[in-house]
Image: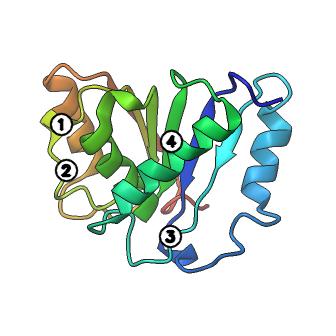
Amino acid sequence: ATENMPLVIFLHGIGAVGSPALNENNPMIENAQSIYGTEFPFLILAPTCNNTSWVSKEMPQLLKALIDHTIAENNSDQNKIIITGHSMGSSGVFRMVQLYGAYFSAAVPVSDPDVSLVEPENCLDVPIWAFAGSVEHPFNRDLHELIDEIKNLGGDAEYTELLDIKHGKT
C-alpha cells in the first residue's frame, strides 16, 4: 500500500540522458529501498530525461505534471515530497525549487551542479541540504557559495563536503 507514503524524486546526471532503461534494475534505487524502505517506507520516482537537460524550457512543467500524477495515482503524502539529483540532476533540483518552492518538503542536490543561473532569493521556501565532493571542479559559481547566500537570506540550507570524492564518485 502506497497511501500516505513520502515521495522521493531522483533526477539523474547527464550520463543517463536518453536511457529509457534507467529505472529498470537500477542498483541505486534498489539499494535505497533495501536500506531505508523497511524502516522508512517511501516511493521513488526516477524519471528519465531524454532531452538535453532537466532545466530546458519545457522540462520543469513536464516533471511537475509527472510528480502530481504520481502523487494522485499512489495517494502519496503531499507534505512529504523530497527532490534530489546528481550533477545535471542537481541543476534540475534547483530549477524545480525556484519554480515550485514550498511544493517540496526538502531538496538534496548532490555534486556540484551549474548554479550560475540560480537566484538564491527564489530558494527560500524549502529546506536544502547540498553535498559535493572535496575534489570536484566547481562551475561558474560554487555550490557552497550559493548555499551560504541562501542561508544569509534567511533560507534553511546546509552544505556538506565529502572528503576525497570526485563529482559523486570515489
Q: Earlier in the sequence, mark 4 or mark 1?
A: 4
Residue type at numbered disc 4: Asp
In the rendered image, which residue does mark 1 sit on? 122
Q: Position of residue 141 (x, y in %)?
A: 19, 56
Could you tell me how far apart the alpha carbons at marks 4 and 1 are, in whole angstroms? 21 Å
Disc 1 packing (10 Å; few <14; some 14–19; many ≥20): some
- Res 118 label: 2
Q: Nearer the viewer, residue 168 or 38?
A: 38
| Residue 87 can be seen, yes or no | no
The answer to whether marks 3 and 2 mark residues whose Cβ atoms lie closer than 8 Å is no
Is label 2 in a helix, a strand or a loop? loop
Residue occupying image coordinates x 76% and y 24% = 40
The answer to whether marks 4 and 2 mark residues whose Cβ atoms lie closer than 8 Å is no
Is label 3 in a helix, a strand or a loop? loop
Residue occupying image coordinates x 25% and y 64% = 139
Is label 1 in a helix, a strand or a loop? helix
Above/below status of 146 relative to 124: below
In the rendered image, which residue does mark 3 sit on? 49
Could you tell me how far apart the alpha carbons at marks 4 and 2 are, in whole angstroms? 24 Å
4 or 1: mark nearer the eye: 4
Q: Earlier in the sequence, mark 4 or mark 2?
A: 4
The answer to whether marks 2 and 1 mark residues whose Cβ atoms lie closer than 8 Å is yes
Is label 4 in a helix, a strand or a loop? helix
Could you tell me how far apart the alpha carbons at marks 3 and 1 are, in whole angstroms? 24 Å
Compared across the picture, whether 150 is left or right of 62 comes to left
- Res 68 label: 4
Q: Earlier in the sequence, mark 3 or mark 2?
A: 3
The answer to whether marks 3 and 1 mark residues whose Cβ atoms lie closer than 8 Å is no
Residue occupying image coordinates x 26% and y 44% = 99
Could you tell me how far apart the alpha carbons at marks 4 and 3 are, in whole angstroms? 17 Å
Compared across the picture, whether 110 is left or right of 47 comes to left
